[in-house]
Amino acid sequence: MAVRSAKREPVTRNLRPRTPRTAASVRKQSVSDVIARSLEEDIVLGRRHPREHLVEQDLCERFNTHRGDVRLALFELEKKGIVRRIPNRGAIVRDLTPKEVREIYAVREELEVMAMRILPFPVAKSDLDKLAELQRKHSAAIDAGDLLTVFYSNLHFHQMLFGLCSNTCLIEAIELLAQKTYGIRSYANTFPEALDQARRDHIEMIEALRASRRDDLIALARRHLKPSQEAYIRAYERRFGDSNQAVMIPAK
């Protein structure tokens, strides 16, 4: 399956708000956001690998900016659990051990199943139509080999799905744990059968929602999480060995 490379987003510059103070704050926010999003996409698409160093000077040159913007971006990615910063060593793409992955996915499963349990039926036709449209975009991206659109359309599908439960605290918890596993997505996406299974799961989820079949929806929520988890663990153990202990990288 051919993968279409994503266009690099330009860094926003030359903004002209009313005061110099506002100009500085807007510029920092906009540039660091572009850097963070670009790095996040690199990680999701497998262009950056676990334990890979993110060198500040290289990023400054890539985005034609200074270290302040780069550090703000890395700080945001660290808060999401995607990047790890090590004293005197800089930032690396965070790697999750098999033990950490199993723990995260165990909690994700319970939270997502809870959302399906409390989701009110019947679901409005307008919401079902929005989910169906997001699934069509996801399916078309799979067929086109556009993995960046696959990622975003899948992300938006699940945000819409879990948003139906209307529990803000639960939705935020689901989103937080999903962010920690962004780097895992690229492993399952290398297998066409995993993408096809995700597509079928989405279609079945919509059908279960339409028919108010809660038990089927819960079973699908549990099944849907497994391919990414299993693909990452297999890849991790091939590369680093079978270890359930967190990897410690000593500071120099």
Image (spheres, helix red, strand yellow):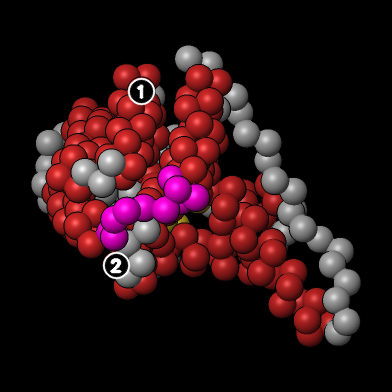
Q: Residue furthest top?
A: 1
Residue 32's disc is none
Could one spot residue 157 in this view of the protein?
A: no
Residue shown at the point (46%, 38%) measured from the top left = 132
Residue 210, x across and y down, in percent: 33, 42
Q: Which residue is mark 1?
A: 196
Quadrant location of the C terminus in the rendered image: bottom left
Q: Nearer the viewer, residue 153 or 190?
A: 153
Give the spatial CA distance, label 2 vs label 1. Answer: 28 Å
Would you place residue 166 above or below residue 102 in this image? below
Q: Amino acid at mark 1?
A: Asp
Would you place residue 236 above or below residue 87 in this image? above
Q: Is residue 44 left or right of residue 28?
A: left
Whether the magenta-drawn stretch holds residue 120 is answered as yes
Would you place residue 223 above or below residue 13 in this image? above
Magenta highlight range: 119-128
Q: Which residue is mark 2?
A: 170
Q: Nearer the viewer, residue 110 or 176?
A: 110
Could one spot residue 167 in this view of the protein?
A: yes
Instruction: Tell me the crowding category of disc 2: few under 14, some 14 to 19, or many 20 or more residues within 10 angstroms, Cα based.
Output: some
